[in-house]
Image (spheres, rainbow, N blue to C red):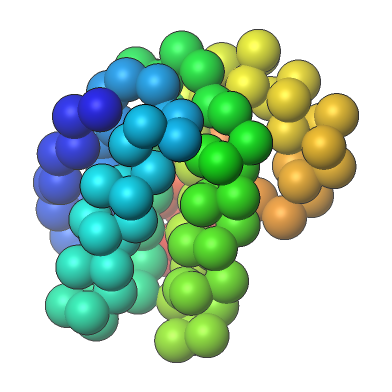
Amino acid sequence: MNIKFEKIHDITLVLLNGELNMDNVSRVREAFKKVLKEKKSRVIVDFDKVPFVDSSGISLLLEIVQSFAKVNGRMCLCHVNKKIISVFEITKVHKLFNIFDSHEDALEFLK
């Protein structure tokens, strides 16, 4: 899993590259702890290069959303493929995430 950060105005864009699974959730968790520690309260997570998310990845995403909510922050996802959306829907967690097709739509939501 590769993780890159970009700034778009005062919003942090997190670009993930690779599977989000039990082998790398701790690394991703630490990256998001850093974002929270830096008081970055609005984040877009780009799933364009994430082909697969397992149950530990879903659990981590729920943990991250809750962490942002505790500090009055907001996080949304974009470019989530249909396979991952299906997993979110089956597990009923899709209702807990704000999911957008593009960066632009996500940015508009976070403004």
Q: Is residue 31 left or right of residue 42?
A: left
Residue at screen point 14% across, 53% down: 7
| Observer-nearest of 23 and 28 | 23
Q: In which quadrant of the rendered image does the N terminus lie?
A: top left
User: Which residue is the extreme one toward the front?
Assistant: 23
Quarter of the image with the C terminus in it: bottom left
79 with respect to 46 (left or right): right
Picture mark count: 0
Side of 97 where 5 appears, left or right: left
* Residue 13 visible, this angle: no
Residue 62, placed above or below residue 28: below
Image vertical order of residue 11 relative to residue 61, above or below = below
Image coordinates of residue 59 in percent, x first then y, are 60, 50
The answer to which quarter of the image holds residue 16 is: top left
- Relative to 37, is 109 above or below? above
User: Which residue occupies the foreground of this view, 56 or 78?
Assistant: 56
Seen in the image, is 17 located left or right of residue 5? right
Determine the residue positioned at 33% across, 50% down: 26
Front residue of 84/1: it is 1
Tell me where residue 69 appears, x and y as whole percent.
Answer: 55, 78
Instruction: Locate residue 36: give its quadrant.
Output: bottom left
Q: Is residue 77 visible?
A: yes
From what the image shows, is residue 46 above or below residue 18?
below
Residue 78, how many percent across, how many down?
48, 34
Q: Nearer the viewer, residue 26 or 4?
A: 26
Residue at 15% in and 39% down: 4
